[in-house]
Image (cartoon, rainbow, N blue to C red):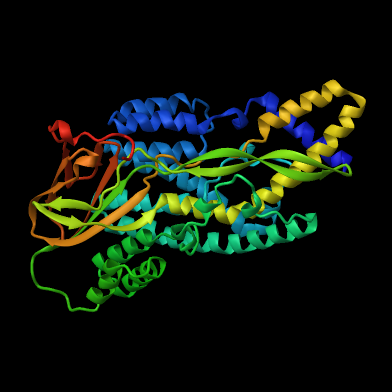
Amino acid sequence: MASRALTAIALSAVTLLSGCSAFRNYDSELAQTNQQLATGNVDAALTLLEKNNTGEDKDLLYYFEKGELLRAKGDLSGSQNAWTSADQVVGKWEDSVKIDSAKYLAQFGSFLVNDKVRRYEGYDYEKVMLTTQMALNLLALNDFDGARTAIKKTHEREAVIADLRDKEYLKSEEEAEKEGITTQYKDLQGYPVASLDAPEVVGLKNSYQSAFSHYLAGFVYEALGEKDLAAPGYRKAAELRPNTPLLEQALKDLDKKGTKDEDSDILIVVQSGLAPARDSIRIPLPLPISGSVVITPLSFPVIKPDTSTATFAQIGVDGQQLYLTQLNSTTAMSQRALRDDMPGIIVRTTVRAVTRGVAQKKINETNPLAGLAVGITSAVLEGADTRTWRTLPDNTQVVRLRLKKGEHQVTLPNVVGGSTVKVTVDQRYQVISLRAVGNQVFASGVAAHVTPSASPTAVASLAKP
């Protein structure tokens, strides 16, 4: 035990001296970046991102954020290149899991290394939303075949994640039993348990399957004439988000004979807000250390929902107000991911704290100064991991309608700037993607162009009322 503990301390010391990600305040970095995005200054946001990522070995988060910022700027080629780099990183992760999931789980489940000093691998919902966002980029260019490829990868990725998480949760339960740890997140006094037990969180089947992703898959397959593949997409979306008329209607309409009119089938996708941040909260827990029970403050992650963008439920199309249907909440998915991960986080954090406490007691007995240094090192390193994809949109809402070919106007509510978007409809099936952050509306692709409102009343506060 002593040898293992001293190894842990040595690893911590090396990490401290190396100045790695343990000292990076990612939430602070991205708060500044997102502030520029919310005011429409995408170039400044990109400059900040580059300033905070000067090393040659870029991590997954860099490519996540860069892809979304370039998408907001309208640079779909640059966005797709950044996300292709991210997809390659995730692909390597998938390969390692497929080749030897037991080895991967053993490495990830190590008790000696704090989560925040590991190389960032992305949360499951981020990996799945990556290929969904890539599909939206391609659809903005009317590339339905390319979007089909991205959607197929999304489905394959979900299968890999599902298999791995089943094994991981079982392993976490076994480790908790082996270490005698019975603490659950509901036992953490002062922890915001209600956020993880909210109906919209508990109601999710898991943290990574999105009704929007599957509905989009159905729409793409339908547009390509592959109704046998469109039906499972719509069906899965309805399963993930039951009692949603839009999803039920998609299945019914799929069975109807094709219409002969020249109108276009249009899907307007409105993504708003920003993914929630992660913060670290300290909770005191009684731990058995060297035969004594010691009250020890331990750090656990919490979710901080974004408040940059006001919520809205309608948009105007050629002067007619239409209700939007929400199909995805990144906040809810993030909270569900944390809810599912908390048992493993509690086991790793607790065992590491006990091991560190035993080692520190032994060091104190022979060298109090060294024991103090170890204590300071531990305090710095033991915060919860707060890294997460922050520019990812929070809410995804859609409306589906038939429009005649030609130019149309889409208007956003005043709470997000009151912008007008000129839309050119020239395809039998078409996807129009809009993004609202703060009081800014962004559109990309060949068919949509934003005209900001000149009305001073159209400027919204960056905080919800």
Residue 124 in view of the camera: no
Residue furthest to the front in view is 189
Quadrant of the image occupied by residue 212: bottom left
Judged left or right of residue 220, residue 10 is right
Look at 67% across and 63% down and name the residue there: 170
Check the picture and name the quadrant holding the N terminus.
top right
Check the picture and name the quadrant holding the C terminus.
top left
Quadrant of the image occupied by residue 260: bottom left
| Total numbered labels placed on residues in the image | 0
Viewer-side residue, 244 vs 169: 244
Quadrant of the image occupied by residue 115: top right
x and y percentages locating residue 320 in the rendered image: 10, 55
Look at 41% across and 66% down and name the residue there: 240
x and y percentages locating residue 74 in the rendered image: 26, 38
Q: Is residue 93 above or below residue 306?
A: below
Q: Is residue 104 above or below residue 152?
A: above
Judged left or right of residue 313, residue 278 is right
Viewer-side residue, 307 vs 412: 307
Residue furthest to the right in view is 366
Viewer-side residue, 435 vs 151: 435
Look at 60% across and 44% down and name the residue there: 190
x and y percentages locating residue 142 in the rendered image: 23, 53
Q: Is residue 290 above or below residue 24?
A: below
x and y percentages locating residue 323 in the rendered image: 21, 58
